[in-house]
Structures are given as C-alpha cells and as structure tokens.
Amino acid sequence: MKLVLRHLTSGLIYARSLRILPSLIGTIIPFFWQMVNLYGTLPAVLITLAILQIITVSLTAIIYPFLYLRLSFLTVYCLAVLITAIAFISWVFINVYRNHRAKFKLIKLQFSTRTALILLSHLLSNRVLSIPLSSRTTFWDIHLKPNLAGQLQTKSREEIIAAIRHDYQQAQNLMPNAVFFGCSPGSFKTLLIAAGLQESQFSILETIIPQEHARVFGVNRPFYLYVIFVT
C-alpha cells in the first residue's frame, strides 16, 4: 500500500517528464527535414501537417473523457492545439538557449529524441545503430548554420576543420553525454578525423536519398546520415 501511495505522490510525475512536450516536436521536425530531402518541400510540409493533425486529434480524444464531457469536442480540440503550440514554443526556446550559449561556428542544434534517431536511421539506411546511453543522454538534430547551407564550398578545408574542432570542443564543455545526428550530401569523415575526432566517436551511414536531390545544395553527391557522440 505504501508503494501505491508513493506512485500517486512523489512518483506521479518526475521533473524530467517536463521534456515530453518539446520532445514531441523534437521527434517530428527531423522527419520534416529528411522528407524535404526525399520528396521535396511541398510534400514534406503536407506530411508534417498531417502528422501534427493526427497528434492533435489524438490528444483531443485523450483529454475529452477526463473533462466528463462538460466541454464541446471543438473546445477540447482548441485546448489540444494550445498544448501543441506550447510544446512548439518550449522546443524553440530550448534550441535558442542552447545555440546562444554554445556559440557554434559551423552548426546549429535542434532538440530531438532517441526515437527520431532510431526511426530515421531505419528509414534512411535500414539500420538501427547501437548508441551509448546514460540517464542524462540528450539527442540533437544537427544542421549547418543557415548562412552556410549550400555555401560550404566557399570555405577552405582548413577553415572547416577549425570550425568542426571548435564546435566539438564547445559541445564537450557544455553538453557531455549528447548525441548529434543529421543528414547531409557528401562525406565529412576525413574532415572529422582531421579535426581530432576518433572513428569511435561518430558513425556515418549512406542513405537512400537520391544523389541528384543534392543539386539543391549546389552539389551532386550521395547523402549520408551522421551520428556524433559527445563524451
């Protein structure tokens, strides 16, 4: 009986459970970017909106019975939309705070989840990676900074290596036990090694994204899924 009481008091909700809201958005957004790479921007937007709609309607169906049917379904739906909006705002706040604090030179991060990484690696490469985990491991969707996207060829090899080394050191100082993942045309393996990373600190998988889709970035190279472990 004491155990039941503890589950209904101190064990009812844990502090880290507050991450559920931004994690919801952080699981969806990485799929949006890879749907863009796979199918184009318009299909990606439609697919993402459809997923958000399904989540909102499902949330409405869950909340509705708990209000003893006192509110109309439309009112509860609006409440579910509000919760989804709060989740998005909290996700944006985490991203802005983390990127502002880290002051990366080459990359920007978006808060994500292990679920997103597992599903993406299976979708794009038909593999599920073995990932070192701890209770404090966080997952981040990684992108080039907007001003560098499609313009990386304007930077020298030495500048890119120095930026990678700086960003990884910043991540080690501020974000231990983190996993970064993202997808990009062309292999950065030699650059990562030149920047001081060991091969055990990252994995690179070739994806099913058609090579010709890389032309939107100004190149014509295969797409690779990158997973970088920050220890």
Image: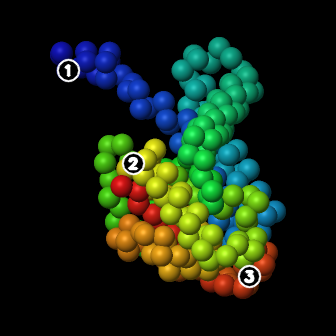
| Amino acid on which disc 1 is placed | Leu
Q: Residue at x 45, y 63 (%)?
A: 228
Picture quadrant where residue 57 is located: top right
The image shows residue 28, relative to residue 208, as above or below, that is: above
Q: Position of residue 86 (x, y in %)?
A: 65, 30
Q: Mark 2 Cα within 10 Å, few/some/many (few <14, many 20+)?
A: some
Residue at image position (38%, 67%) is 201
In the rendering, which numbered label is found on residue 36? none
Q: Nearer the viewer, mark 1 or mark 3?
A: 3
Q: Name which residue lies at 32% across and 15% down.
A: 9
Between discs 1 and 3, the one toward the N terminus: 1
User: Is residue 156 visible from the viewing direction of this image?
Assistant: yes
Amino acid residing under circle 2 = Pro
Judged left or right of residue 175, residue 9 is left
The kind of secondary structure element at disc 1 is: helix
User: Under tag 3, what secondary structure?
Assistant: loop
Give the residue at x 73% y 27%: 78
Residue 3: give its label. 1
Q: Position of residue 171 (x, y in %)?
A: 48, 51
The percent coordinates of residue 100 (x first, y second) are 62, 41
Q: Work out whether mark 2 precedes mark 1 in sequence or the reverse, and give the earlier one.
A: 1
In front: label 2 or label 1: 2
Alpha carbon separation for disc pair 3 and 2 = 33 Å
Mark 1, Cα crowd under 10 Å, few <14 / some 14-19 / many 20+, is few
> Quick one: 111 or 70, which is closer to the camera?
111
Q: On residue 219, which mark appears?
A: 3
Q: Which residue is mark 2?
A: 176
Q: Tell me the amino acid under the disc marked 3.
A: Val
State how far apart marks 2 and 1 are (Cα).
34 Å
